[in-house]
Amino acid sequence: MIKNKDLLLLANLRADSRMHLKEISRNTRIPVSTLYDRIKAKAGDSILRNSCLLDFDKLGFNVKAHVLFRVNKTDKENLRKFLIKSLNVNNMYKINNGYDFIVEFVFRTVSDMENYLEKMDQKFSIKTKDVHYIIEDLKRESFLSDSALVPALFPEDSQ
């Protein structure tokens, strides 16, 4: 089981992955040398990569949508490989309840997205495709990003 101090470290990194270790040390009361060792140990394990969140609208990509796909078994693996390589796919998940994948697409325009999906229909045996356009981001990538909430998430560790 993960220790409360490790969760505090991760929460600080989730809030700002460029935060200096001295500041994290002040926030967590963990020595800098210990923080460095813990981060190094978690790299590639629970810390998959350091990244930044982008405002796609400000970059000219004004269309985001989640699309649920149900595909013929014969095409499922080919579609998976195709989508993983696609530049317009931001996130992709294998799911259940009658669908195979849910994919978050990012495009400049609705017509760009519609053309892309039309070409996919021609290339793959897609049984069902449900498109849900994202109107506004209300909350993104915030789980475990507030160190003050760590004790509430793991009350058994806060004694």
Image (spheres, rainbow, N blue to C red):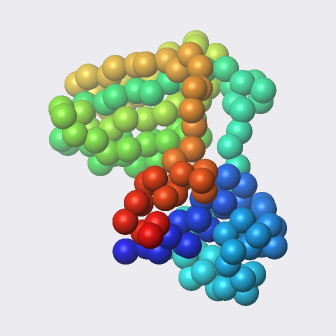
Q: Quadrant of residue 119?
A: top left
Q: Nearer the viewer, residue 121 or 18?
A: 18
Position above or below: 68 against 4: above
Q: Nearer the viewer, residue 47 or 105?
A: 47
The residue depicted at 76 percent of the width and 70 percent of the height is: 26
Give left or right: position of 50 versus 1: right
Q: Residue furthest front?
A: 159
Q: Quarter holding the C terminus?
A: bottom left
The residue depicted at 56 percent of the width and 16 percent of the height is: 135
Q: Is residue 86 visible?
A: no
Position above or below: 6 against 14: below
Residue 30, percent from left and from top:
67, 78
Q: Quadrant of residue 76?
A: top left
Position above or below: 90 against 34: above
Give left or right: position of 21 versus 61: right
Q: Nearer the viewer, residue 151 or 47?
A: 151
Give left or right: position of 129 versus 87: left
Residue 27, percent from left and from top:
72, 65
Q: Quadrant of residue 19?
A: bottom right
Q: Quarter holding the N terminus?
A: bottom left
Q: Is residue 141 visible?
A: yes
